[in-house]
Amino acid sequence: MMDFLMNNMWVIWLVLFIASIILEAISFQLFSIWFALGAVVALVASLLGAPIWLQILLFIVVSGAALGATRPLVRKIQRKQEPTNADRYVDQAGVVLEKIDNVKGTGQVKVLGQVWTARTKDGSEIAKGASVRTIAIEGVKLYVETAE
């Protein structure tokens, strides 16, 4: 059994490499690229006849080092959000045109001359005609709170 595993370990590393690449291609999140790199190094070590313990150690060390070296940079890049024209509606005054009720899924506000679907973050209801302040935008919905 050990001889079989030793002679065919390269297959396991190759499958792990391919699976990591496929997962990366599907997710677009830089989630498994580090494991693909570790699998390639372990695959090469296997083809050169390295013992299994060394292959596993190389896989762990290379994957961990690649993850540690690049993950903070990737997170910083992924957090960057480009402002859009819709951002100008945040922190603006508006008036409720239709009662805001998250449970019923109703609510409209007029902000900067435009009518928007509106909801509240805390789930509270806001009556028609009330003054509101926008606090966030998600998709085509403005989240508002009662103006003070």
Image: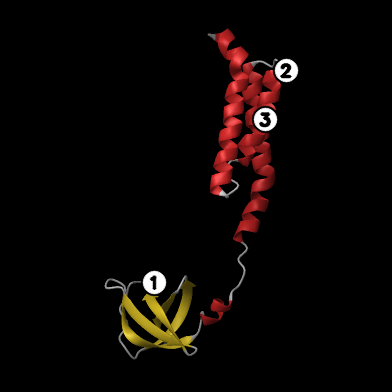
- State which tag comes first along the sequence, 3 or 1: 3
What residue lies at 45% left-to-right and 83% top-to-bottom? 133
Report the front residue among 54 and 38. Answer: 38
Does the CB distance between marks 1 and 2 fall below 8 Å? Answer: no
Say which label, 1 or 2, has the lower sequence index.
Answer: 2
| Residue type pointed to by label 1 | Lys
**Image location of residue 16, percent across then percent down:** 57, 30
Q: Which residue is drawn at 27% across and 73% down?
A: 104
- Residue type at numbered disc 2: Leu
- Which residue is at a point 64% across and 25% down the rendered structure image? 57
* Secondary element type, mark 3: helix
Left or right, 126 with reference to 111: left
In x, y percent, where is residue 116?
Answer: 42, 81
Q: Give the distance between the C-alpha atoms of the residues marked 3 and 1, in whole angstroms.
A: 47 Å
The residue that disc 2 covers is: 48
Q: Residue lying furthest left in this view?
A: 104
Occupied quadrant, residue 66: top right
How far apart are the alpha carbons under marks 3 and 2?
Answer: 12 Å
Q: What is the CA distance from the residue labelled 1 to the residue labelled 2? A: 59 Å
- The picture places residue 6, in percent across and down from the top left corner, at 61, 13
Position of residue 57 relative to residue 101, above or below, is above
The amino acid type found where label 3 is placed reads Val
Instruction: Give the residue number, with chain letter if any, for mark 3.
Output: 40
Task: Give the number of the mark in front: 3 or 1.
Answer: 3
Secondary element under disc 1, as helix, strand or loop, is loop
Task: Please name the residue that numbered disc 1 is placed on.
Answer: 121
Q: Is residue 110 left or right of residue 85?
A: left
Asked if the residue at tag 1 contacts the one at tag 3, i.e. Cβ–Cβ closer than 8 Å, the answer is no
Of the 4 image quadrants, the one containing the C terminus is bottom left
Name the element at disc 2. Answer: loop
